[in-house]
Image: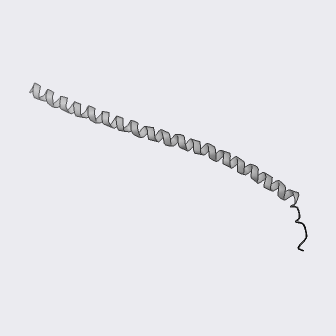
Amino acid sequence: MMGASPTRPPASLNREVGELRVRLESVEDEMRILRADVREIRDALVSVKGGWRVLACLVSLSATLGGLLARVLDELLT
């Protein structure tokens, strides 16, 4: 029938679509929170990388100075 008006979907279908919209909005909100958490973790990892480099340099420097001091003391005491 060409001139027939479209039929309205049953009330249960409208209710189901409404429930799905609410669930989708909830999932979108959770995704926003998850993205923010991932950004915080990424930023923390980036800042830790720099901290580890400084720590590694300090350990290397102290080991070098300790080795030099031990050699100098050995030469002085023998």
Q: In the displayed image of the protein, which residue is found farthest to the left?
A: 78
Residue at 58% of width from left, 45% of height from top? 35
Q: How is the image coloured?
A: one colour
Q: Within the image, what quadrant is residue 51 found in?
A: top left
Quadrant where the C terminus is found in the figure: top left
Q: Is residue 51 left or right of residue 72?
A: right
Quarter of the picture holding the N terminus: bottom right
Residue 32 in the image: above or below residue 69 = below
Which residue is pictured at 87% across the width and 57% down the height?
11
**Image-based side of 32 in relation to 5, left or right:** left
> In screen coordinates, is 43 left or right of 11?
left
Residue 54, quarter of the rendered image: top left
The image quarter containing residue 34 is top right
Question: Residue 14 at what x, y percent from top left?
Answer: 83, 56
**Residue at 88% across / 73% down in the picture?**
2
**Number of numbered discs visible in the structure rendering:** 0
55 or 4, which lies in front? 4
The residue positioned farthest toward the top in the image shown:
77
Relative to residue 46, is residue 69 depicted above or below?
above
| In-front residue for pair 67/18 | 18
Where residue 61 appears, as percent x and y from the top left, is 27, 33
Return the residue found at the far bottom: 1
| Residue 13 x, y percent position in the rendering | 83, 58
